[in-house]
Amino acid sequence: MAKCKMKSHRGACKRMKVTGSGKIQRHKAYKSHILTKKTPKRKQGLRKSTVLTSADQKRMLRSMAK
């Protein structure tokens, strides 16, 4: 049997970005609706992107492989 190439997960590729050092950047959740009860400080923190944890990074790099 011939081995097939693994397809990249297009949804993950559109939502995350690999930095120059090889880490994965993602956007934070809980910023789309019901914002009136959240404090301005909390919403400000949700605007910034963050780095994926090392536990998830290996799995996501495998699914984002092109």
Image: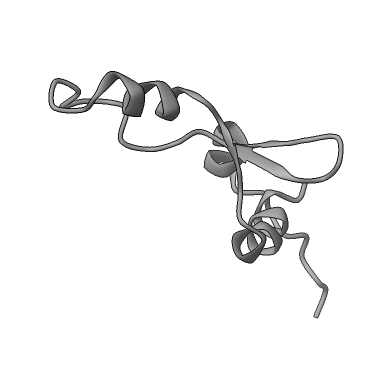
Q: Residue 25, image x and y in percent? A: 64, 38
Q: Is residue 34 above or below residue 29?
A: above
Q: How many marks?
A: 0
Compared with 1, 21 (above or below) is above
Q: Is residue 22 left or right of residue 6?
A: right
Image quadrant where residue 21 sits: top right
Q: Residue at x 81, y 72 (%)?
A: 3
Nearest the eye: 33 or 11: 33
User: Where, by quadrant of the figure, is residue 23 drawn?
Assistant: top right
In this rendering, the answer to whether 45 lies above or below 63 is above
Query: How are the colours assigned in the image?
Result: one colour
Q: Can you give x and y, in whole percent of width and height, for residue 27 in the image? A: 50, 33
Q: Looking at the picture, how far across and down is residue 18, in whole percent?
A: 74, 38
Q: Residue at x 67, y 57 (%)?
A: 57
Left or right of 46, for residue 57: right
- Spot the residue most to the right: 21
Point out residue 4 in the picture as x, y percentages from the top left corner.
Answer: 77, 65
Q: Is residue 37 above or below residue 52?
A: above
> Which of 50 and 11 lies nearest the eye of the viewer?
50
Q: Quadrant of the N terminus?
A: bottom right
**Residue located at (60% from left, 61% from top):** 56
Say left or right for 23 vs 32. Answer: right
At 30% across and 35% down in the image, what residue appears?
A: 30
